[in-house]
Amino acid sequence: MLLCYFLLYNGIGDNMNIVDLINKKRENLELTKEELNYIIDSYMQGITKDYQISALLMAICLNGMSEEETFNLTEIMLNSGEIYNLDNVNGIKVDKHSTGGVGDKTTLVIAPLVASSGLVVPKMSGRGLGHTGGTIDKLESIEKFNVSLKREDFIKELNAIGLAITTTDMDMVPADKKLYALRDVTGTVSSIPLIASSIMSKKIATNADKIVLDVKVGDGALLKTKESAIELAKLMVKIGKHFNKETIAVITNMNYPIGSSVGNGLEVQEAIQTLKGAGDPDFRNLCITLASYMISLGKNIDFESAKAEVITNLDNGLAYQKFEQMVSYQNGNIKNIDISSKTINYKSTKEGYLNNIKTLKLGQYVMKLGAGRESIEDNIDYGVGIVLNKKIGDYIHIGDTIATIYVRGEDTSLKLLDDIFIIEEHQGEKEPLIYDVVK
């Protein structure tokens, strides 16, 4: 059987057949670069059908891909569209990517913080889908903030203040968009090689010099185990190096919500508080860690020196000034953030230690309030969400306000929160914020 496959797949494109290639992957054999190119090209042209690619994706999910296959798939998807040209941007460009989490507003703090150190942060972000919010959705809660910059305006802003956050006006990595849409409805999202090639093709297409990856693991993340997160992190770092992009991955905890707020306008408000030196201490520490790795890479200095610079720029107001500059450049009114004026308090009916907050369920609850999308076409309410008044490890008395819910309508289904906030007699052990770093 093996000899048959080796003889069959030494040919080139004209002799290829998608069914044979599906069978080859089903037999756990390695696809060549030419074969992968044929698969993607024929799919983009509509020759190969969704149901055929679905079968191939499932075979990849079950059998995995070699590093060489993953490098090749990343390159093919990268070259399926445009690559952003940052040659006219002065300075070292550093990008950051998060695999997504509940309450993840870190970009809003990290980007201006890193830019305040003299590095350039060209950030192309997206809208959220499901229980994790998108950076663009958060920024759109700021009145008149322009999230769709033209290329010349994006470059101009980067050269002027070293920072810009926008959606892209380019057809970047269209093959990944098409593949991901199919993965999302065929149960093939969780494949490590497919995740790695999807993320890194987009990051490389944005053309920053250095990349820091925030790989989240836990209840509210796509990856549920530290082992799978480390596997993904190592593979993405290898892909970055393969494309001559110095890359670091930080494995972070997503068993707890990030910070004290979940919901678009509320998260912008919390980011501003953090940039002003206040806010949730765990969230502040996460931002300091990620920003320090970005500055360490960008300036080629050790982590502790970078961290000292980060803390200084948080405390002296330079980071917040940079955020204000960005909002002003992109026509936003920072004094008017969409946050609902109607609130309801969720009070405890138990006494004990708050040992857990079920993060996935919390994200889904806030999505049902209207802060998230079930499909990309859905409209969202920027002003709704939840603010956590208590942290993991706090002792809770009966009647204490655990959370404040920002709503528009009447029905908030507060009873659902009883299954989200876990209060127990004995204090549990709090997990660390940062699990590991992969270089």
Image: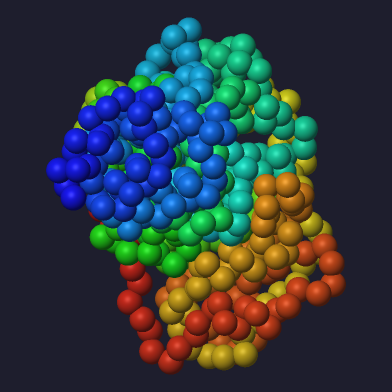
Is residue 273 toward the left or the right of residue 55 in the image?
Answer: right
List x then y, in percent, for residue 51: 52, 50
Q: Quadrant of the C terminus?
A: top left
Is residue 211 toward the left or the right of residue 320 in the image?
Answer: left
Residue 219: which quarter of the image? bottom left
Is residue 200 toward the left or the right of residue 345 in the image?
Answer: left
Q: Residue at x 56, y 77 (%)?
A: 420
List x then y, in percent, for residue 300: 24, 25
Comparing 129 with 369, the one in front is 129
Is residue 395 toward the left or the right of residue 273 in the image?
Answer: left
* 344 vs 395: above or below: above
Residue 415 visible in the current orientation: yes
- Badge count: 0
List x then y, in percent, for residue 21: 35, 42
Q: Residue at x 48, y 31 (%)?
A: 42
Comparing 384 with 67, the one in front is 67
Q: Residue at x 61, y 11 (%)?
A: 152
Comparing 327 with 96, the one in front is 96
